[in-house]
Image (cartoon, rainbow, N blue to C red):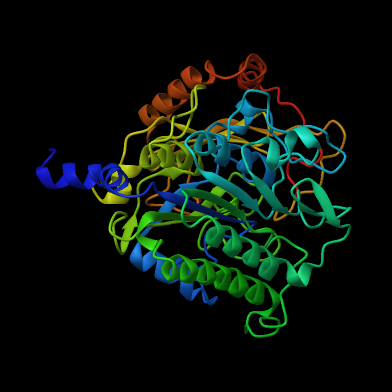
């Protein structure tokens, strides 16, 4: 029932922006940070600034990345569309010359059209050649390593110029943070969008002298503490310039943890379509608008960032159909749950799982170990003899297949997947039909690494 109170809560973002300055947006994206790596998600690691942001904002317990590895998840985050739609279904390497498909618009494109100043600081990983760099995808400026820090050459770029052939890992986080703070201060009188995809805690790890050796949990703890410090520096800058109440801060991660880090009590890690590989932390903060101290258990996706930011800023939505939804009612507290389409889990072009509410169906499984190397020639995905069904409320670590007890649920979700696949490019549709007949394509090298 829509009451006056819930209506005002739902309308608050639009009213606030209309009454004052346009809304600023900061999107911070960690690399390989696990669902269980923050204090507010139960970790022993020290993350006081993110914990405070969660206390002052809304923390989500069921946020899914669009893919369990780097490049595809970032493509989906910035477009609101599945990576299999936008031309980045696998991890990109320095030898690659590809990126987002022509015609795809990023959140930066959309906000720039609305008059925003835009900057990307950190790991891009959506193509490092000229047509694919951030400065060609809606960002006024870029500063960072264009791909993963374990790839060579490890360029540090300033806009389109390489300023270091081999970036110094120990100084990355403070240098990134300095550049991000500078951007905020230089654009405090204008609406701005800062996309801040940190390099860490992807390995190899590096922490500055101020943090090295300070955590009782080793270098991983040092790195996470420094990331949290970076959050604190941004928050201090916002408050210093009176921008805190007019800035939406979003924090998440691209996928689950790799060698180190924790998926919490979830099964699986990076590269896997078990929940530990694809469920990520999500904290959203805006004092006076985003519900304070709220823990939301509704199913959401990192693909929801684009439609939600467009709704809150008034920016035009992409012309191409998007897979994310506007979750503003969850942020304001107007609703505790939203209806949505089935969410698909891909390894590259193969559908491995499908999620609807608390239910998750497994169709096939490629990864079964912590880290999977590139597959041997001709190796196929493992097509399950029978689809498996898990109740993630009763069984969050996906230990008990309940398909036999819930045939109607299984049938309903499979029927929705069959319909949803019809909206994908033709080669994805054909691949899905092949899957149903038991023939799956090998995963390209790199699809399950980095």
Relative horizontal placement of residue 235, taking residue 122 as reference (left or right): left
Specify whether residue 203 is in view. yes
Q: Position of residue 355 (x, y in %)?
A: 46, 37
Q: Residue at x 70, y 84 (%)?
A: 213
Q: Position of residue 63 (x, y in %)?
A: 46, 49
**Quarter of the view holding residue 140:** top right
Q: Position of residue 352 (x, y in %)?
A: 60, 34
Against 3, residue 289 (above or below) is: below
Considering depth in this image, is 83 or 130 the residue closer to the camera? Answer: 130
Considering depth in this image, is 436 or 401 the residue closer to the camera? Answer: 436
Relative horizontal placement of residue 53, taking residue 258 as reference (left or right): left
Q: Position of residue 121 (x, y in %)?
A: 65, 55
Which corner quadrant holds the N terminus?
top left
Against 265, residue 276 (above or below) is: above
Considering depth in this image, is 86 or 301 the residue closer to the camera? Answer: 86
Specify whether residue 368 is in view. no
Q: Residue at x 68, y 24 (%)?
A: 102
Relative horizontal placement of residue 153, taking residue 128 as reference (left or right): right
Q: Residue at x 29, y 62 (%)?
A: 292
Against 311, residue 27 (above or below) is: below
**Quarter of the view holding residue 71:** top right
- Please tell me how many numbered marks the rendered image carries: 0
């Amino acid at each position: 029932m829509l009451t006056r109170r819930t209506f005002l809560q739902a309308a608050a973002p639009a009213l606030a922006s209309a009454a004052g300055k346009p809304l600023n947006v900061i999107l911070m994206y960690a690399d390989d940070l696990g669902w269980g790596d923050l204090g507010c998600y139960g970790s022993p690691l020290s993350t006081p600034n993110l914990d405070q942001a969660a206390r002052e904002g809304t923390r989500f317990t069921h946020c899914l990345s669009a893919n369990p590895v780097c490049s595809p998840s970032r493509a989906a985050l910035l477009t609101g569309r599945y990576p299999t739609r936008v031309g980045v279904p696998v991890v990109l390497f320095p030898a690659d010359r590809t990126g987002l498909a022509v015609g795809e618009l990023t959140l930066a494109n959309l906000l720039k059209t609305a008059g925003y100043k835009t900057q990307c600081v950190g790991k891009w990983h959506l193509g490092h050649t000229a047509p694919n760099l951030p400065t060609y995808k809606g960002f006024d400026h870029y500063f960072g390593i264009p791909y993963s820090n374990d790839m060579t050459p490890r360029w540090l770029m300033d806009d389109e110029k390489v300023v270091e052939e081999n970036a110094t890992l120990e100084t990355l986080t403070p240098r990134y943070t300095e550049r991000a703070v500078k951007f905020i201060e230089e654009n405090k009188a204008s609406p701005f969008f800062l996309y801040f995809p940190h390099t860490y805690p992807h390995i190899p790890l590096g922490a500055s002298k101020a943090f090295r050796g300070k955590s009782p949990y080793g270098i991983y703890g040092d790195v996470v503490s420094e990331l949290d410090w970076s959050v604190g520096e941004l928050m201090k800058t916002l408050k210093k310039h009176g921008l805190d109440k007019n800035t939406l801060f979003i924090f998440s991660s691209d996928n689950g943890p790799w060698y180190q880090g924790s998926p919490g009590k979830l099964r699986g890690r990076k590269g896997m379509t078990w929940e530990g590989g694809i469920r990520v932390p999500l904290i959203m903060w805006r004092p006076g608008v985003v519900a304070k101290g709220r823990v939301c258990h509704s199913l959401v996706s990192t693909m929801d960032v684009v439609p939600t930011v467009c709704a809150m800023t008034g920016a035009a939505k992409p012309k191409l159909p998007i897979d994310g939804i506007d979750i503003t009612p969850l942020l304001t507290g107007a609703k505790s749950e939203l209806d949505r389409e089935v969410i698909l889990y891909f390894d590259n072009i193969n559908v491995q799982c499908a999620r609807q509410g608390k239910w998750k169906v497994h169709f096939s499984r490629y990864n079964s170990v912590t880290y999977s190397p590139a597959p041997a020639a001709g190796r196929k995905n493992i097509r399950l003899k029978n689809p498996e069904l898990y109740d993630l409320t009763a069984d969050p670590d996906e230990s008990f297949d309940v398909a036999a007890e819930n045939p109607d649920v299984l049938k309903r979700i499979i029927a929705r997947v069959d319909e949803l696949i019809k909206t994908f490019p033709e080669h994805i549709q054909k691949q899905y039909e092949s899957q149903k007949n038991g023939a799956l394509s090998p995963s390209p090298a790199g699809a399950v690494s980095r």
